[in-house]
């Protein structure tokens, strides 16, 4: 029997499709993945305006308007991922995207802060259907040596978005069945629903990587939430001009996509050849070491490039490790990083105990970012060494 990585030359096997047929659906889905994360930060430059119009006087509630979307983003995958494995990704994606569109559009008509917060939460809940569900499809279509670039193209959309607001059949054989036909539908649902929790409790990889990725994501959303104040108050820029600074995050992401994916695939191929063609998921991890160091040194341009380099390595590591069950592993990462993206901007306003005082007010931007950099080293380097 042919292995999953070297399938027989069946034209219906997605790994044997022509290159163009693989990239068309990948590109199309990347469009979906672009839009919902865009909604996470589209309100960032206007948080002060929103606060005035909806009478938001509590310091912690302004970043809540931005980050509540990520709370829904983190909760959604808990039931969306199992549903997509049972009923098919296309059905779930189309239904939940329609609900996302409805709730996200309704945000524009919110008359109170409570309405806006609830609608933003529901938008994130249903918008999470597009993000992370398709990594396992990349595993279906691309061999291990090809996945780096495919994952980079797919992954760049949810990272660029905030910066700009199996198939297998054998011809002639009809007596095929899936393992799920041997079980009742209730048993299928039970297995899929608990797989993620079992991975989280029993697999160190699915514990370490989400912790690291969550820290990265949390730092990114601290940037989204609080840097507009730096640009508008300290540097006296208009909101329309200050929002252009987010382009630096996009530049860092694109830079990392081009450089990191090429280096990641080359390192992966070199290590496989060195180990007599033995494939190990750890061969996707080496690039995380220098990226973690850069992460601690830089912010904005270098920071997002380093964060994205670590994200690419994390995602390809999980796919190579868990194969057909990679969606569950990637969902674990998605959940924790969304929770940290939600909590970090709020936590930073309470860290010093004063409800109305921000860490940036106490330590200023330089020392606060330095502290976050040291924390990144303390979490990132041990995480990579553990792998």
Image (spheres, helix red, strand yellow):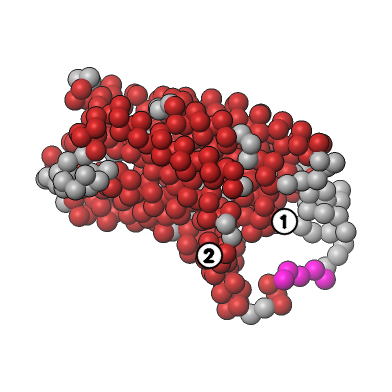
| x and y percentages locating residue 244 in the rendered image | 34, 24
For numbered disc 2, what is the local secondary structure?
helix
* Front residue of this view, candidates 143 and 294: 294
The residue stretch that appears in magenta: 175-179
| In the foreground, 161 or 99 | 161
Q: Is residue 76 above or below residue 49?
A: below
Lower sequence index among marks 2 and 1: 1
Q: Residues within 10 Å of mark 2 (few under 14, many from 20)?
A: few
Residue drawn at 41 percent across, 59 percent down: 75
Q: Residue at x 72, y 37 (%)?
A: 268
80 vs 226, nearest the viewer? 226
The location of residue 56, given as percent across then percent down, is 14, 46
Q: Quadrant of residue 155?
A: top right
- Dominant secondary structure, magenta: loop
Is 47 within the magenta?
no
Residue at image point 16% right, 51% down: 112
In the image, what residue occupies the spot 33% across and 45% down?
344
Left or right of 227: which side holds 96?
Answer: right
Task: Give me the disc on residue 201.
Answer: 2
Q: Which numbered marker is on residue 167? A: 1
Q: Residues within 10 Å of mark 1 (few under 14, many from 20)?
A: few
Would you say 218 lies left or right of 132 here? Answer: left
Quick check: is 176 in the magenta stretch? yes
Q: Splitting the image into 4 quarters, where does residue 358 fall?
A: top left
């Amino acid at each position: 029997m042919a292995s999953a990585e070297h399938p027989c030359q069946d034209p219906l096997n997605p790994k044997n499709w022509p290159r163009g047929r693989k990239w068309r659906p990948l590109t199309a889905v990347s469009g979906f993945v672009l839009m919902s994360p865009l909604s996470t930060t589209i309100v960032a430059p206007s948080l002060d305006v929103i606060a005035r119009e909806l009478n938001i006087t509590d310091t912690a509630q302004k970043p809540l308007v931005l980050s509540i979307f990520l709370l829904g983003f983190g909760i959604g995958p808990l039931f969306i991922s199992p549903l997509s494995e049972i009923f098919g990704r296309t059905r779930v994606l189309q239904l939940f995207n329609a609900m996302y569109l409805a709730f996200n559009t309704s945000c524009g008509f919110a008359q109170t802060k409570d309405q806006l917060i609830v609608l933003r939460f529901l938008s994130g809940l249903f918008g999470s259907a597009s993000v992370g569900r398709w990594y396992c499809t990349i595993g279906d279509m691309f061999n291990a040596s090809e996945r780096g670039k495919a994952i980079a193209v797919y992954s760049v959309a949810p990272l660029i978005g905030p910066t700009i607001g199996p198939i297998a059949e054998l011809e002639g054989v009809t007596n095929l069945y899936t393992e799920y036909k041997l079980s009742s539908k209730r048993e299928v649902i039970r297995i899929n629903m608990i797989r993620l929790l079992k991975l989280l409790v029993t697999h160190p990889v699915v514990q370490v990587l989400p912790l690291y990725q969550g820290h990265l994501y949390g730092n990114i959303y601290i940037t989204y939430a609080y840097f507009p104040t730096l640009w508008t108050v300290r540097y006296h820029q208009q909101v329309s001009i200050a929002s252009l600074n987010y382009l630096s995050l996009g530049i860092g992401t694109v830079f990392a996509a081009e450089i990191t994916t090429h280096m990641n695939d080359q390192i992966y191929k070199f290590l496989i050849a060195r180990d007599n063609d033995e494939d190990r998921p750890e061969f996707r991890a080496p690039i995380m070491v220098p990226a973690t160091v850069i992460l601690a040194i830089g912010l904005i341009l270098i920071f997002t490039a380093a964060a994205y380099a670590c994200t690419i390595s994390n995602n390809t590591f999980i796919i190579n490790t868990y194969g057909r069950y990679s969606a569950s592993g990637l969902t674990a990462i998605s959940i924790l990083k969304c929770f940290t993206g939600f909590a970090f901007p709020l936590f930073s306003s309470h860290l010093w105990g004063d409800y109305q005082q921000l860490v940036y007010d106490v330590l200023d931007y330089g020392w606060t970012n330095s502290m976050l950099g040291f924390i990144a080293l303390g979490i990132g380097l041990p995480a990579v060494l553990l792998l």
